[in-house]
Each structure stands twice: as structure tokens, then as C-alpha cells.
Amino acid sequence: EVQLVESGGGSVQAGGSMRLSCSVSGGPSSTTYCMGWFRQAPGKGREGVASIDNWGSTNYEDYVKDRFTISKDSAKNTVDLQMTNLRSDDTAIYYCVADWEMSCSSGYVPLDRDFVYWGQGIQVTVSS
């Protein structure tokens, strides 16, 4: 059974930093995968944030580019999201996502419907 467990959320003031981590377990042995982060703000739809594939190729949505960094540790089976210069509109529930036999090196963050596996979500609150 595939499990994605997020950690590291909480509250921070605008301009601050926060690091989210996602522990991935139970995935297939395939070396081809795509992992990433989505978010959903109160009253809004779900939107992509960033993605990373097995080769380390990354994609970012424009609204987080140059502020957020996605990374992975294949040995630990984790994917992290380092967030800097946080703004109040970054307040949302953040979800870790993953799928195997899937490429995400096309230059954009895949759509949410492209990912089969989702974490339970973790709250990030940025106060101004």
C-alpha cells in the first residue's frame, strides 16, 4: 500500500520560511516516477506548486518560482518543499503527490488528475 505522509507545516509570518517534507512508502520498484506538491487555499480550487522526477528535473508554477524549491532524497524516499519569502496568499493545505511510470519532465507541473497517490495534506498558514 502506497503511503505519503507530510510533515513540517504550521504558522509563519509573511517573509518567513518553512520546509515541508513528504515520506513516501509502499511504492513499486519502478525507477520512473514523478512526485510533487499541490495546495488548496480556503474557498479556492486545488492548484499545482512544483514537481520533480526521478532524474531530478523540476517544474514550478509561476506564483512560487524563485521562492520555493523542491528536492528529493531517493535513499530516504522523501520529497521536500523549501518555501521562502512566504506571503499570505501561500496560506493553504499542501498535499504531497506521487505516481510511478509517469514522466513530469515536460516543462510544467502535471495536473492534479495525473497523480494517483496523495498525502492527507498539511496546513500552512502565513500571517501578514
Image (tube, rainbow, N blue to C red):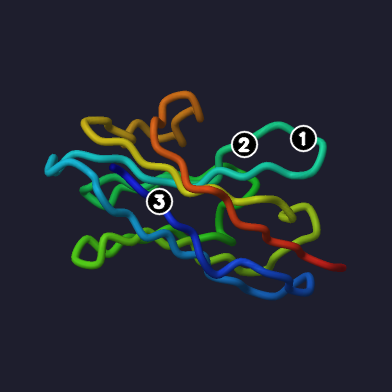
x, y (%) of residue 121? 57, 50
x, y (%) of residue 126? 77, 65
The correct choice, above or below, for 97 with respect to 56 in the image is: above
Q: Is residue 78 left or right of residue 59?
A: left
Q: Earlier in the sequence, mark 3 or mark 2?
A: 3
Residue type at tag 1: Lys
- For label 3, the SS is strand
Q: Which residue is rendered at x = 28% and y = 42% of the image?
A: 1
Q: Is residue 9 left or right of residue 126?
A: left
Residue nearer the viewer, 114 or 29 = 29
x, y (%) of residue 90? 71, 55
Please identify the quadrant where the C terminus is shown.
bottom right
Q: Is residue 11 left or right of residue 55?
A: right
The residue to which callout 2 is attached is 47
Q: Are marks 1 and 2 in contact (CB under 8 Å)?
A: yes
Extreme residue toward the top, this view = 113
**Can you tell which of label 3 and label 2 is closer to the viewer?**
3
The residue to which callout 3 is attached is 4
Q: Which residue is rendered at x = 32% and y = 36% of the image?
A: 99
Tag 3: Cα neighbours inside 10 Å, few (<14), some, or many (≥20)?
many
The residue to which callout 1 is attached is 44
